[in-house]
Amino acid sequence: MSKYKVIIFDMDGVLVDTENYYYTRRKTFLTRKGISIDHLSPLVFIGGNMKQVWHMILGDDYEKWDVPALEAEYLDYKLANRIPYETLVFSDAKASILSLIEKGYLLGLASSTAKIEILRALEVTQLMPYFDVILSGESFKESKPNPEIYEVAMKTLSVLPEETLIIEDSQKGIAAGVASGATVWGIKDYRFGLDQNSANRLFDTLTQIDAQL
């Protein structure tokens, strides 16, 4: 077995292929409100959450909007247009996770996504039982690239950073993992132009990662 005792996964872009769905749903909602995001790269949204980017979305019009009301309306829209996680889960996710558990690793999940969405995603993909800790960025004052979510995950699992492997894809997530002191392996991005240079290693699939452990 490798030096790692724990593997902590990000969710979006690592276990489920959701980034395009997120972007399209967000753009559709904002367009209906008369708000354009054409001035922003999709990279702005990947690996973070909406509370980080309202200022960038609204720009000089920020003070003209009731942002809490806008956030509440967007939440309702998301609940009415749920992500089909069962069709977006990566085909090798469950097999890779089961293999890692058989090898003796404890598994964690640390995502910037809202907790209610994380739990629904894990339920519909049947991955819920395999994680020893599940954390959402909404539980923390700052989301990724702040490393706190990973630091808390390691503390909860009683492991040191050098005993921890983090699986990420986004620039923000990789930065958070590196800042936590853990080793970070990334799932290669071929669509968005993500800067993944800070990851210790890059892989095409979870199957390839499993084969290295």
Image (spheres, rainbow, N blue to C red):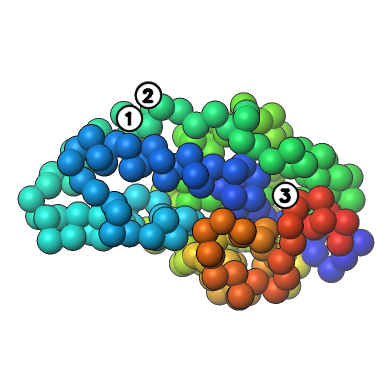
Q: Going by the image, does 57 lie left or right of 170?
A: left
Q: Name the amino acid type tagged 3.
A: Leu
Q: Mark 3 or mark 1, which has the lower sequence index?
A: 1
Question: Closer to the camera: disc 3 or disc 1?
Answer: 1
Do labels 2 and 3 touch, CB within 8 Å? Answer: no
Kindly state the secondary structure of the residue where label 3 is placed: strand
Residue 79's spot in the image, x, y percent? 39, 27
Q: Going by the image, does 116 lie left or right of 72?
A: right
Pointer 2: what residue? 80
Do labels 2 and 1 touch, CB within 8 Å? Answer: yes
Image quadrant in which you'd find residue 198: bottom right
Q: Mark 2 or mark 3, which has the lower sequence index?
A: 2
How far apart in space, not on screen, are marks 3 and 1 (Cα)?
32 Å
| Neighbour tally class for label 3: few under 14, some 14-19, many 20 plus, Cα within 10 Å | many
Question: Closer to the camera: disc 2 or disc 3?
Answer: 2
Residue 156's spot in the image, x, y percent? 62, 55
- Disc assigned to residue 77: 1
Kindly state the secondary structure of the residue where label 2 is placed: helix
Kindly state the secondary structure of the residue where label 1 is placed: helix
The one nearer the camera, 30 or 212, is: 30
Would residue 136 be visible to someone looking at this image? no
How far apart in space, not on screen, are marks 2 and 3 (Cα)?
31 Å
Residue 96's spot in the image, x, y percent? 80, 45
- Disc assigned to residue 107: 3
Image quadrant in which you'd find residue 1: bottom right
Q: Name the amino acid type tagged 2.
A: Ala
Q: Name the amino acid type tagged 1.
A: Tyr
